[in-house]
Amino acid sequence: MKNLKMKAARVAKDMSQEALAREVGVTRQTILMIESGKYNPTLNLCIEICKALDSTLDELFWEEWQQ
């Protein structure tokens, strides 16, 4: 599943994938793969992304399930 919440938070901070990748210590391709839903990041990477984007794990990575 695509991570549109993470992408929206990154764009809201006017941050490129490259800039976010640099800040959290991964490649731009890793950020691209997370946003496109092709890679599940570790909890530590999720936390670093949240810090960089001034967000919480719930805001960026929690999936809302509808019944």
Image: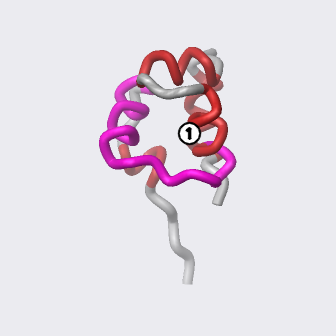
Q: Which region is colored magenta?
A: 35-53
Q: Amino acid at mark 1?
A: Met
Q: Residues within 10 Å of mark 1 (few under 14, many from 20)?
A: many
User: On the rendered structure, is 3 left or right of 22?
Assistant: right
**Closest to the observer, 32 or 59:** 32
Q: In x, y percent, where is residue 24?
A: 42, 24
**Is 41 in the magenta?**
yes
Q: Is residue 13 above or below residue 30?
A: above
Q: Is residue 44 above or below residue 51?
A: below
Q: In x, y percent, where is residue 64?
A: 51, 65
**Is 36 in the magenta?**
yes
Residue receiving disc 1? 6
- Residue at 64% x, 25% y: name it: 11
- Residue at 49% x, 17% y: name it: 22
Q: In x, y percent, where is residue 58?
A: 39, 50
Q: Quadrant of the N terminus?
A: bottom right
Q: Is residue 64 above or below residue 48?
A: below
- Residue at 56% x, 15% y: name it: 19
